[in-house]
Structures are given as C-alpha cells and as structure tokens.
Amino acid sequence: MRPDASCEESCSLSKLAIGKSSLLSADHVRALLDSIQEESSGVVFPFLAFMAGTALSPGEAVSVRVHELTLPEGEFGEVLVRAGEGRRVPVSPDIVGVLRRWIDEADLEFEDLLFPAERGGPLASSEYKRAWRRARQAVLSPGEVQAGLGEQVSSLRDSCLDRWLEAGVPAWGVAEWAGVSASWIALRYPHRFGLEDVEIDWGHLEEILRLPDIPER
C-alpha cells in the first residue's frame, strides 16, 4: 500500500467495486452543475465544478490555495495537491475558465484559499452538501434518487476517475492523479478492464514471443 494512500485503499474488496450503472454519467454531471450554477451563488458552483474536473476529494479541494494552481487561459492547467506525498493533477480548459473567473470575482490573493467560506476559513461541508441535495432532487429522476445515484458529493470524484479511464488514460496515470494505487483503480472500476475492450496486435505478439530457431534433430 502506498504510504500516501487515502482510506480508500483499506476498503474491503467486496465493497470496493462500483458498477457502471452506479456512476454519474457526463450528462448527469453537466446537468447537476448547471442546476447548481443557477440556484446557488458564490463559492459552491466553482467548488463542485473543480471537484468534477479534477477528481479531488472534498477534503483536498477545500484545502487548495490559489498559488497551488497553474491556469493558462484556454489550455490545460494543473493543481498541486499537497496531501500525502503530493501530486499534480491536470485541470481541463473549461475548469480553468471557471476558476479564473472565480478568482477574479472573489478578488482572491496569491496565498488565499481557493474556496474560502463567506467569513473566512475553509468552506463548510454543509454549504455545498445542501446545494448538492437540491440539485439531485431537481435533475435526477425519482428512480435514480431512490437508487442512491450521486448520493454523496464524492460521486463527482468517482465519475471523473471513470471518465479518465474511458478516455484512454492508463490506469497507472489515473492512479497517480488520484493519489491511489493502480490496483485500487482496477478493483474499483472493473468494467473498464474487460479483455474484450482491448485491441490486441496479434502479429506483434507473435513476433515478441517467437523462440530462437531450434535446429532439427
């Protein structure tokens, strides 16, 4: 186990795997964030959008400071996560835009928390959880709500990690960005590791497995 691994690493294997039907789709995430942007003001929308695009846990996201971000306009940026051994996580151009606007609107300084509470200090979980509950009720179907889809804000993390895998990022790369091990990623998202989804170059495989010429006896 990696020394910087979160409690996710110690989950029992029987509880670790998450089925594809239990994950928020990209359309779900967009609709939820749209609802939150319309109904909530201030810090909540940029905070949840940041989580959705970087797969940070809520605890990691509330601790980020402005100087730990690199946000080039119109390009991929980066956030330095200092938890554990530390890691660098990409920030997509659309989230870069959200954060640049938020930093300007909130008049944040270099050393400030990226997502401060209204009266200073880290953002309280009660504030973003309340907005999340309202968005779920507004966006998801009654059946999806009853089934527990997106019940926790941390569902944004799972959805992002799954979409990275879907996009073709290697498991070890997703693990590095997420701060967990590659084995944890494979056990958590088994639907992304089916052999039927792998394109095998049989000719190359034959070449590298070929034995040296053996003289006839």
Image (tube, rainbow, N blue to C red):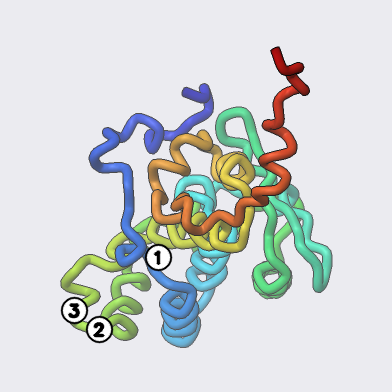
* Residue picked out by circle 3: 143
Q: Amino acid at mark 3?
A: Gly
Question: Which mark identifies residue 128?
Answer: 1
Query: Identity of the amino acid at label 1?
Result: Tyr
Residue 165's spot in the image, x, y percent?
Answer: 55, 56
Residue extending furthest front?
217
How far is mark 3 from mark 2, CA to CA?
5 Å
Using the image as rendered, state which of residue 154 and residue 108 is in the foreground.
Answer: 154
Viewer can see residue 116: no
Sequence-wise, the earlier of marks 3 and 1 is 1
Three-letter residue code for mark 2: Ser
From the viewer's perspective, tell me whether residue 136 is left or right of residue 76: left
For the point 65% across and 69% down, the residue is 95
Q: In front: 116, or 54?
A: 54
Q: Which mark is residue 141?
A: 2
Depth order, front residue of 69/17:
17
Q: For mark 3, does the 10 Å Cα neighbourhood hold few (<14), some (14 to 19), or many (20 or more) residues?
A: few
Badge 3 vs badge 2, beta-carbon distance below 8 Å: yes
